[in-house]
Every structure is written in structure tokens, then in C-alpha cells.
Image (cartoon, rainbow, N blue to C red):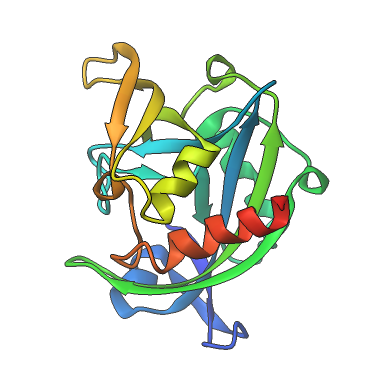
Amino acid sequence: MIEYIDVLDEHMQPVGVATREEIHQKGYWHQTFHCCVMLQGENQDYILFQKRHPRKQTFPNKLDISAAGHLLQGETVEDGLRELEEELGITAAYKDLLYLGVYKANYETESLLNREFNHLHLLKSNLQLSDFNIQRSEVSGLYKIEWRSFLDLLHGNKEKVRAIGFEYNLRGEKIEGQLDVSREDFAAQDASWDGYFRFVFETIEKVLG
């Protein structure tokens, strides 16, 4: 099935429609939905990261924002809520999300030109890792990192932090455990933590006070 996506200009105004393949081959501007899930505990909060599937075209096996996906032709930002259900197996109302703004991503890899308007959101949740049912064709696992520790990684105060979670191996076996992760283990979209990651998590830091 061919997916069609609205093409925008650099000012986020619609100018046409193209297939997903054309969007990335020709570097057309388009829109995506991104949501960072914060798991709230009694004493500390955690940021939830998905581990990208090893067969993904971009950033395979890297830790990434909790859920994200393209907005298709005619869709609104609110329609992006489906990514939470598709990738994480949870449901939420758009009113439960905190809108963080738009990050204008512009980067290249060997296989694509990516120019996106990322609509960023935060979802605070009392769910446990065991409550999530991941889309195993896209996501190989989920890991949580304590919020303050992650900020230390973001600001360069730590080289590694502890990630706790699970993933499925290629035989479909669920492996629970812990990882010590550094910046190199994340899908830094613009090849630098000074871009997307800094914008997202410093915005969350400001919002939470």
C-alpha cells in the first residue's frame, strides 16, 4: 500500500502531495508526530525510550524518542496519537498530552534527505514497563532512564547512564535487563545532541521546572 504525505514549504505551508519514498528521496518538507513518555514513580520519574528495530533503514538498534511517525495526507497533529497505540500498545487522549512545540529537523544520511517539522509532545503516565505492548516489526524493545540521570547525560555531566527495560531478540525471545548507555547509543537525528535531543529535553526541563 502506497502512503501519501502532504508536502510543505520551509514555512510549514502546504504545497502538494508525495509518496513516502519521494518525500525522503527528494528532501521535501513534511510533518511528523513525536511523543516523549515520562513514567512517574513515587520517588523518581523516568523517560521511556524505544529501541529501534535492527532492520530499520535509519538508526537501527539505537534508542529513540518513545513514539513517533509521519502524518499522512490530510491528517492533523492530533491524528498522530495512533503512534502511541501502534508502537507502544497504549491509548491516550490528545488533551492528556502537553504540546512542546515544533522542531525543524534537516539532516541527511546515506539513504535519505530528511526535512521534517517534528510536532513534539510529552505524556506523563503511571504505567509500568510491563503495561506496554510494542510493535515488534518497528520496535525491538523499551528502556527507561531516570530523568535526572538523563539530564546529566544531556548536559555532559555523565558519560554513561543506566537504562532498565526489555527487548526481543531475532528469535522472538523477550530479554529483560539493564544497559549502561552513552550518547552514541541514541538516534541523534542531526548527528549531534545539540540539535533535536537538546531541544526536546531542555524544553521538557523548562516545562517541568
* Residue 62 pos. (x, y %): 29, 43
Residue 15 lies, in percent from the top left, at 56, 87
Report which quarter residue 196 is drawn in: bottom left
Q: Is residue 58 left or right of residue 31?
A: left
Query: Could you tell me residue 65's position as x and y percent?
Result: 47, 47
Rendered view: 44 above or below 18: above
Which residue is rendered at x = 54% and y = 39% of the image? 147
Residue at point 66%, 48% (across, down): 122
Residue at the far right in the pictured view: 95
Observer able to see residue 95: yes
Q: Does residue 136 show up?
A: no
Q: Nearer the viewer, residue 33 or 165?
A: 165
Left or right, 14 with reference to 109: right
Identified at 33% across, 16% down, the residue is 177
- Residue at far left of view: 110
The x and y percentages for residue 180 are 29, 31
Q: Residue at x 78, y 41 (%)?
A: 93
Q: Nearer the viewer, residue 123 or 135?
A: 123
Vertical order, 72 against 150 (above or below): below
Tell me if 148 is positioned left or right of 181 in this view.
Answer: right
Q: Picture quarter containing residue 23?
A: bottom left
Q: Nearer the viewer, residue 52 or 164?
A: 164
